[in-house]
Amino acid sequence: MAKIYISSTYEDLKNERGAAAQAVRRLDHTAIAMEDDVASGKRPVDKCLEDVRNCDAYIGIFAWRYGFIPKGYNKSITHLEYEEAKKAGKECLIFLLDAKAPWPGDKFDRGDAAEKIDLLRKELQENHEISFFNTADELSSLVSPAVVGLNLEKEKPLTISSEKPRLGPLVHKMCDRLTQLKDFLKFFQEKSRECPKRPQFYFIHGDELEGHESLLQVLINTSLKDHVERQWGSDKPKPYSWNVTWPKEGSLGDRKDQLPVNMMAGFQTWYEIDDFDVNTLARLPCFNKYPLVLIIHTLSDSIWDNTTEQLIAWYIHEYWAALEWNDDIPHFLVFFNVKYSHPDKKGLKQKIFKWKYMPGELIRRRLEHIIKLSGEKCPCRLIKELTPVGVGDIREWFNQNRIYESELKRREKAQAIFRESGCMSKLEENLRKIIIECQKSGEVLLT
C-alpha cells in the first residue's frame, strides 16, 4: 500500500478531490489530503509540505483558481506543494480541467491571481504529460489507470516469494498505452452522459502483434471496473465480456444470418433460444447481475472485403439499432479488434493460404467512413492506432515502476529489450520477466 498526496485548491474542487481520493483508495492505496489533517502545532503550509515529502506519489488537480498565498510566501500552498513534490523526486500525476469544460463563473480567479494560475498551468503542460478532465467522474476514470501505471508499492527490498506483486499482471501491459486509454475514456464518459445505456462501438486497430487484447484487459480491470462501482455500487461484478466469431465467408445475407447465431452460440447450452434478435440477447437471464457487458470481435486485413464493411454497417445501424434499451438491460460496449498482419508473417501467409490483404491505411479510411455515417445515434470511436513502443518508452516504464536503481542499468536493459522485442506482445513478455527477475534478485526499488 502506498501513500498518494492529493493537491488542489479546495473550495472549487471539493468533488474532484473526493473522486480522485476514492479512485486511489479503490486501488488499496492511502489518499492523503489537507482536509484529513488533525490539529497540530505546526503551520498549515509546513504540515502540507511535510505530507508531500512523506508520500510515495503526488496527484495535482488544477482548475482556474491559484489558491491561498500564506504569509511570508509569494506562491500559493497548492503551487508550493507541487514544487515540493518535484524537489523530493516524487512521481507527479497532473490533471487539468479542460478549457472547454463548463465551469461556474464564481470559480474563476481574476486579476493577478488569474495570471498566476495561467502561468502555472502552462508550466505544468510544459513539464508533464497532462490529462484533461471535464467532470469529477471523468477525473476518477483517468486517475485509476494512471496510478496503476505507477505500480506503487510500499518501498522495501523485494525478497524471493511466491506472492505476486499487486497488479503485476496488468502493469507490464501498460507500457506506452495511456494514449489509447485516455482516448477511450474521454469518449466513453462523454457518450455515457449524453445517451446512457445506448450501445457504444469501438475499433482498436494496429499491427497484430501490438497487444489489442492487452489493452482491453487493462480497460476491463481498471477504468470500466471503476465505472461500474461508481454507477452501480461495489457489490456489482466487473464487466462481463465474451468473444464472438465474426463471419468471414458467404454473401452478405449469409453473414447477416450467421452473426446473430454466433452471438448466441455460447448461451444455447443454458437456454432454449429460437429467436436471435438483439432484444433476446440483451434480456438473457445470465446478464441480470451485470450492468456492463462487452462484446469483442476480431477482424483481420486478410479477410477484409467489401462485404465485411457492409456487415459492420448493418450490424451497427440495423441489428443494434433495434435494441429497446432501458434500465432492465445492461449497457453494451462492442469492441472490434482490427488487426493488420505483421510484415514478417504476411509473406508466409500469402504463400501458404493465397490470402489477399487489404492495406491498413485503406481499412482506416473505410472505418472512418462507417463512423461518420453512424452519427450520434450510434456512438462509434476509432481508437488511436496501436503503434510500436520506442526505447524511451521502456526507460520510462522502468522509471515509473522503480525498476533498477542504476540509471546506467536502466538504459542498457531498455536498449537490450528494445532490440529483441520489436513488438508489444514480445515486449510484454520481456517486461513480465523483469518483474520476476526483480523479485528473485531482491532488487531494491527506488523511493
Image (spheres, helix red, strand yellow):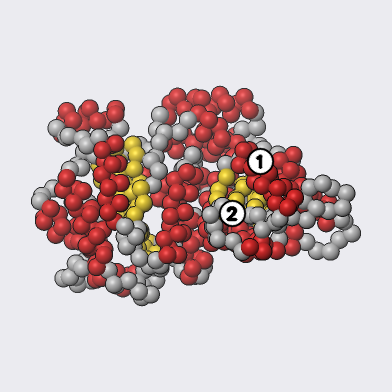
From this viewpoint, is residue 411 visible? Answer: yes
Position in image of residue 151 (x %, y %): 58, 46
- For residue 144, what is the image quadrant? bottom right
Left/right of residue 123 with respect to residue 418 in the rendered view: right
* Residue under label 1: 123
> Residue flagged by tag 2: what amino acid is it?
Leu
Q: Quadrant of the C terminus?
A: top right
Left/right of residue 31 with respect to residue 422 in the rendered view: right
> Which residue is more in the foreground, 201 or 115?
115
| Mark 2 burial class by Cα count in 10 Å: few <14, some 14-19, many 20+ | many
Position in image of residue 265 (x %, y %): 21, 61
Position in image of residue 336 (x %, y %): 31, 50
Position in image of residue 54 (x %, y %): 75, 48
> Which residue is more in the foreground, 372 or 318?
372
Residue 192 against residue 187 in the figure, above or below: below
Residue for point 22% across, 28% down: 348
Q: Earlier in the sequence, mark 2 or mark 1?
A: 2
Disc 2 element: strand
Residue for point 86% across, 61% down: 40
Asked if marks 2 and 1 touch (Cβ < 8 Å), the reply is no
> Residue flagged by tag 1: what amino acid is it?
Glu
From this viewpoint, is residue 221 visible? Answer: no
- How far is disc 2 from disc 1 in space, using C-alphas? 15 Å
- Disc number for residue 27: none
- For residue 127, what is the image quadrant? top right
Disc 1 element: helix
> Which residue is more in the foreground, 14 or 156?
14
- Disc number for residue 97: 2
| Mark 1 burial class by Cα count in 10 Å: few <14, some 14-19, many 20+ | few
Residue 421 against residue 133 in the figure, above or below: above
